[in-house]
Image (spheres, helix red, strand yellow):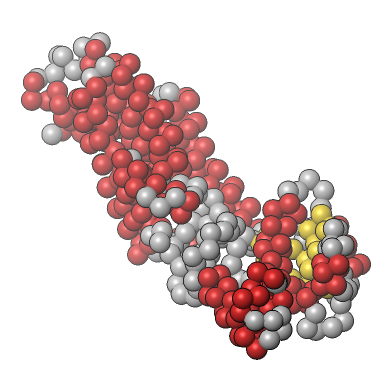
Amino acid sequence: MKKVILWFFLCCKRYLKRIPFLLLLAALPLTALAASRMENGKGGTVRIAVCCLDPEPASLGNRLKENLLARDTGLFSFYPCENEQQVRDHVAARKAECGYLIPENLEQKINSGRFKRSITVFSAPSTVTASLSTEVVFSELAAIRNKDILEDYVEQGAAFDALGAAGSPERKKASGQAGDLYKERMEDGSTFRFEYVYTYSPGQTGNGSGETGTAAPSPGLFPVRGLTAVFLFITGLYSAVTAAEDSRRGLFTPLPVRLRLPCRFASLAAPVALAALSGLSAVLLSGGPGISSGGAAVILPEAAAMALYALAVSIFSMALGAVLKTPEALGAVIPFFIIGSLVFCPVFFDAERLLPGLGQAGRLFLPYYYLRGFFHWP
């Protein structure tokens, strides 16, 4: 056993002498630290100013403004401004990434068909936020207007003449039922739509569907756990290639037969252990779920999960090496595992949200199981 442990530490020393590998180990925690500071500095959301010039509180413009201000989910945070000049000043000073100026009589402009450029957007230089946030503003406007349009069409449209004359009690009743059905379909989650979702930390409530409740732990906008999981997985595959090359060169031949397999596993596990230390450092430095509060109650479970995952990666890589045997075959499958892990595992997004059942392909890749343990995607 002592010889196996000694072999493990010698292999660690061997990998630490490889400058490219050493730089990779340092890159992950440094990137996580930099991303964490950027996110904390911005409060985790993008601030957007909004102002409505219509004095009528019940107008479409003011209803749109109130809906935007009431949004407590998403990547964007809308806040009110008193006038156009204040919007301009806040955007110029980068207090807001962009600003929206909603005009008077917005509803009349839309009804008359003269709605192009009705809402003015002020955007800070060198930002893409305006083009992204426009989708959010339009979706809120559509949510208000579409119900009214549907009800008016059911009450006045020729397609429903069989129910009675336009404006008749029967048409008005059908119009109300259509509006209720529209509202139900929009609120029950059955309507397909894209959302810019912000991942919440402990203590916050809400989710992308607008429901309240404690959200699943999340490391913030930077997917530190996802990248760490993929990094460890690829490191394990890379070490399997190196172990196969060492075996071809006869590195393990001088060892007693009973030590060959344990020493080969130690050789394979050494870079994975170093990558696990780098990944654990990245998670702790990122200020992930509960990390900022510190304490052994947080760090120990995190370290235990990382250790178990590193062990699983080492065992999987060892088994894959036993099946494929040659370093060329092992090297050929690495791109498959990289792409599959990034696409089917919840690293940047959950594939199953886009197409039900697609996320099940992630079960073929080890990062899936590590990430599911933390994120609990619905």
Viewer-nearest residue: 300 or 365? 365
Residue at the right extreme?
85
Q: Quadrant of residue 272?
A: top left
Direction from residue 208 to residue 278 in the image, left or right: left
Q: Quadrant of residue 78?
A: bottom right
Q: Is residue 41 above or below residue 18?
A: below
Direction from residue 296 to residue 1 in the image, left or right: left
- In the picture, the quarter occupied by the N terminus is top left
Viewer-nearest residue: 195 or 92? 195
Viewer-nearest residue: 339 or 86? 339
- The residue at 33%/32% (across/down) is 236
Viewer-nearest residue: 100 or 239? 100
- In the picture, the quarter occupied by the C terminus is bottom left
Q: Is residue 206 above or below residue 124?
A: below
- The residue at 72%/76% (across/down) is 156
Q: Quadrant of residue 318?
A: top left
**Residue 170 image offset from top left, x and y in percent:** 62, 85
**Residue 139 image offset from top left, x and y in percent:** 67, 63
**Residue 189 image offset from top left, x and y in percent:** 49, 67
- The residue at 53%/63% (across/down) is 191
- The residue at 38%/27% (across/down) is 334
